[in-house]
Amino acid sequence: MKIRTKAILFFGTLIIFLATLIVVYLTYHVHASFEKQLITNLRITAYKNERAYLEFIQKLNARIADWTSDKYTRDLASKIVDPKLSLKSHKALIDEFMVYVNQEKIKYDNTILSIDLVDPEGVILASSSSDRVGDNEKKGETLSDTDSFPKILKGDFQEAITDPFIFENGQDSDPIFRTTARLFSNILDSKGKPVPLPVVFVVNSNSLSDLVNIFRGTLKGRNGTFNGGFISMFNTSEIYFMNKDGFIITPTRFVKKGFFENQKVIPKPTGECFRSNRDVDGEYSDYKGTLVAGASVCLAGDGVVILTEIETKEAYSIYDDMVRTSIIIIITIFLESLLIIFLAVRSPLDRLANIIETAKKVAEGDIKARTSSVGKDEISYLARVFNNMLDNTMWTERTLRQVSKELSEKKTQLEADIEEHRKQEKFLEQTSRATQNLLENSWKAKEQLQIQSARLETIIASIGDGLIIIDSEYKIVLVNPKAEEMLCLSSNELLGKDLREVVKLKRKKMQETLDEEWPTKEVLLAKSVVVTHLEDELSITTEKRQFKLPIVFSMAPLGKGPSGAVIVVRDVSEDRELDEAKSGFISIASHQLRTPLTTIRWYSEMLLSDNTEALNLTQRDFLNEIHDGAERLYQTIDLLLGISRIESGKIKSEKEAINLNLFTEQISKELAPQASARKLILKTLPPEGEPIVVWLDAIGLRQVILNLLSNAIRYTNENGIIEASWKRSEGKPEVLYSVSDNGIGIPENQRAHIFSKFFRADNAITKTPDGSGLGLALVKDLITAWGGKIWFESPEGKGTTFFFTIPTTSKIATSMDNNTETKGSS
């Protein structure tokens, strides 16, 4: 068989094989991937539907919770349930309630059917409709078909529960949404909480149209408020609610409400929801008996399941078109490839035949035969190489004779070289004896070095603190026995190991220090000395020391080059216990002082609020002094307790989304009267573009900003300017916040102590004698607790700027979303 035929068969078979692989890949793998992605997209859409539904229910609850906090409504309810009222007064209150809810509530929301006050027995005490007063809802099985009524009788203030899809007049009528909330009196009990009333606030609303409108925008060609995204691409897409009987509650393309005309079975997701309380996704038959791809969200507690579906015929049409197009392209490529291969191999094969013919002539003895080598392709190159090989063969014969003569001459030269080598061996033997003498001298020098090394090891072993020496790659090269004892590891377990991997360094109550945060980098590169103090609250753990060991350490570079560092570690367990005992004493003393101080404040406020002339002006001035002094002491105790909680790790942190623009603006408004009284200008400078939103504890952030702004107001002279600004840090996942003023500044010799507890700078005491010196200590502890940093710049007499950072995480939104509400104030 000729090469041309073999080439065509080979490449043809290869193309057919590749085409078969592509078809099989499209048929199985791509189809499976397409089906998996389709079901995944449906599941995502189903979860979006669930979230939209839950937000709708939360909106109903929030509205009723807001209504039940209305002071006028709570006052009316308190009077209506008062058994001491006369029948006439009771009737007047019922009428007043009816007028109020109709004019103030129902008038602005046409979905509300009725608003009732119901006692624990189910009797309607008052209503927006006079003909409902006196009805017993339990006997009519209006309240007894849900669990919310007995549950809400034990509910808290502003707690509301909504029972959806209630058919009061059978399934032929529209379902209603019943929202109930327990009412509380305006009177507070001994714990400062509202006193509950024996009455429940019940609102019946026809909100089904609002719910339907939310999901209508999800489907292709329909208007609505909910953006469905993926599912809106399909004409046969459906989103609807169904109960356990297969009753369709919300409209579909074929059923406005109720059962499908020829419906024979309940869809699989509905049965699974109310039988096993689980969601279903995949292919199944819908209420029409049509095969669909769908995903369900089971809301068994609400008695419904949300179904999101697309007919499989439309869903897989894209895949079918892709397979047909791919097969046509493969066939076209196969035919064109065969033609190209045939034309491509025709000319090269003819030229190969010419080379073969020349080789036959050479084999028969015609050494001067040559082949044609015209052209620049590979075969022409092969022909030229073949011709060159024949030329080289002829030249080699002539060269061999000349080489034989040269070899004879070189043999004589080699014998002379051997004699020279013998003389060199004798010289090397003499050199070896001299080298042995030098080695003996080096051994003696080594013994002296070992003696000096033993002395140095004795000195290191006698040091009372732990000593660790590392090289430029953080590898441990030397430890003394005290360091082994502190780390609970032997030298064999430490030497050669990376210090950052063996020892876990922790700061305060936070997580362990990252590799790039170790001070060793500063020592090795900047050649500076790092010394830590007890206030840094450092501790270490190792694999064998599970309990944290409080330490302080000093670190210095070893030599001038990048040779390593020396670390001296000291155990400060006793010092730490003494410091914690001091903090505990302050916390206990502060708690004990709050009770009598509260009494002093309360009684002084009571006396000062008395408008009678029982006190003369002098006595009233004395009371004002007592009240102001108690108030300042109470604030100082609050600061002490705040610092104590942070240091003990007992502070509670409830993170939430905070819009820094709104949050700072609200705090500045609160402080505006103080700034105005001192004739100061208080500015907030938000960044350009969308507002910055962070995920943080609002109470802690408020305490930080409030303290910094209050200090700026206190220590800035008249006509001064105070500015608060914030922006995203470049290249770092954090927000940089600053508070600046042009006040008295901080003396240079006192800046190192500015964040210490009970410390106040001299110029601050001169300007404002009052003050505890705890505010900045609390600010630093709060910022450190959330993983931030704080520092300041302060030319004395020219003002101060405090900077602090707020780390961002994956949960932090970087801009305001049009459909998302974020917290603007605490």
Image (cartoon, grey):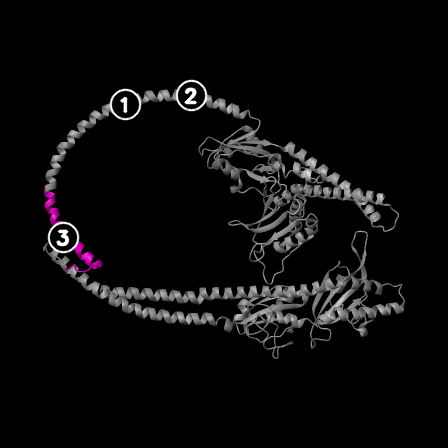
Counting residues from the start of the chain, the first of labels 2 and 3 encountered is: 3
Please state the horizontal and vertical placement of residue 57, each as a whole percent of the image: 67, 65
Marker disc for residue 390: 3
Residue type pointed to by label 3: Leu
Q: Position of residue 224 (x, y in %)?
A: 60, 71
Q: Is residue 642 magenta?
A: no
Quadrant that contains the N terminus: bottom left
* SS type, badge 3: helix
Badge 3 density bin: few <14, some 14–19, many ≥20, Cα 10 Å: some
The region drawn magenta spans: 372-401
Please tell me which residue lies in front, 690 or 532: 690
Above or below, 517 against 460 in this view is: below
How far apart are the alpha carbons under marks 1 and 3?
56 Å
Q: Relative to residue 686, is residue 499 depicted above or below?
A: above
Do the CB atoms of the residues marked 1 and 3 lie less than 8 Å apart?
Answer: no
Of 269 and 741, the residue lying toward us: 741
In the rendered image, which quarter is residue 665 located in?
A: bottom right
- Reading the image, the residue beneath label 2 is 447
Q: Considering depth in this image, is 763 or 705 the residue closer to the camera?
A: 763
Q: CA distance from mark 1 to mark 2?
A: 25 Å
What amino acid does circle 2 point to? Glu
Between the residue at mark 2 and the residue at mark 3, the CA separation in whole angstroms equals 73 Å
Whether residue 310 appears in this view of the structure is yes
Q: Nearer the viewer, residue 420 or 769?
A: 769
Q: Label 2: few (<14), some or many (≥20) within 10 Å?
A: few
Residue linked to disc 1? 431
Q: Secondary structure at mark 2?
A: helix
Q: Earlier in the sequence, mark 1 or mark 3?
A: 3
